[in-house]
């Protein structure tokens, strides 16, 4: 069974996807983290993203693995864990442009399908219900106000020792929404058969319980 969870940045997707996967004992696949991994590596290797052949050459040598360490997913790029390094504000700023490159998306979609193959899986991202798994048994589209999303992001960044103002975060979130939903290749979009969940005024328990109830109806 595939549960597809899409929605804009910091809408509450990851929190609900992680908890849903834990409660159902499904594999949790965070495809945003996968785009962050390739963004980090492209930046570290100073690849010119406007040069298509450099990007393709880079991808042919790029190896991304997903491991479970102490029950939590861990991404390895060419053998090294990058799960902490991909969460910085600097990566958040650049990842949208990198994830819009067609060659990057083609590579990632193939990998996402192979990671989920033969698994019960909760997959979260932007194009999961529309492009990666259009036949997913159940699809959710998670939204929340920009204000609450900026507040949530601020807390997340504080946890990794970064301080950014709410105004700056709101600006970044709006810019990412625009980029992610207006790009020509598989933009962020609600699948027609997705259940929309507005988490602005919901507690985490409320949102997860609501989703579990919907999953149980489908089982
Ligand atoms: O969910 P996140 O903020 O970690 O995602 C990082 C970026 O990756 C986001 O700006 C858009 C991109 N992304 C995507 O294009 N398609 C996905 N399925 C998941 C993420």
Image (cartoon, rainbow, N blue to C red):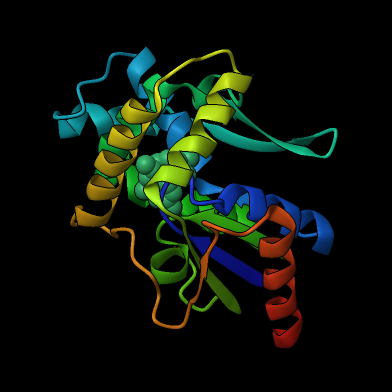
Residue found at x 41% / y 53%: 145
Quadrant of the snapshot with the C terminus = bottom right
Q: Quadrant of ligand 1?
A: top left
* Side of 189 relative to 17 (left or right): left
Residue 209 x %, y %: 75, 67
Depicted 188 relative to depicted 157: above or below: below
Residue 38 visible somewhere in the drawing:
yes
For residue 66, what is the image quadrant? top right
Depicted 181 relative to depicted 87: above or below: below
Residue found at x 54% / y 70%: 140
Residue found at x 38% / y 20%: 90
Residue 93 x %, y %: 32, 28
Residue 165 x %, y %: 39, 22
Quadrant of the snapshot with the N terminus = bottom right
Depicted 70 relative to depicted 200: above or below: above
Residue 52 x %, y %: 17, 34
* Count of number-bearing discs: 0
The residue nearer to you, when weighing 158 against 97, is 158
Residue found at x 18% / y 57%: 184
* Side of 69 relative to 163 (left or right): right
Residue 118 visible somewhere in the drawing:
no
């Amino acid at each position: 069974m595939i549960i597809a969870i899409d929605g804009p940045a910091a809408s509450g997707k990851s929190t609900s996807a992680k908890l849903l996967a834990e409660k159902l004992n499904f594999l949790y696949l965070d495809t945003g983290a996968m785009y962050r991994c390739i963004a980090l590596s492209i930046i570290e290797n100073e690849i010119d993203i406007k040069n298509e052949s450099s990007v393709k050459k880079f991808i042919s040598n790029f190896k991304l693995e997903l491991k479970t360490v102490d029950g939590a997913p861990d991404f390895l790029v060419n053998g090294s864990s990058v799960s902490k390094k991909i969460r910085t504000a600097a990566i958040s700023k650049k990842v949208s442009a990198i994830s819009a490159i067609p060659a990057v998306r083609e590579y990632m979609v193939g990998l996402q399908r192979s990671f989920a193959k033969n698994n019960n899986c909760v997959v979260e991202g932007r194009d999961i219900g529309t492009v990666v798994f259009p036949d997913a048994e159940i699809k959710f589209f998670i939204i929340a106000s920009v204000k609450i999303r900026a507040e949530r992001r601020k807390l997340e960044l504080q946890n990794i020792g970064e301080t950014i103002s709410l105004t700056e975060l709101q600006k970044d979130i709006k810019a990412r929404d625009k980029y992610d939903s207006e790009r020509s290749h598989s933009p962020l979009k609600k699948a027609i058969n997705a259940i929309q969940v507005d988490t602005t005024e919901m507690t985490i328990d409320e949102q997860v319980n609501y989703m579990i109830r919907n999953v149980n109806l489908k089982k």
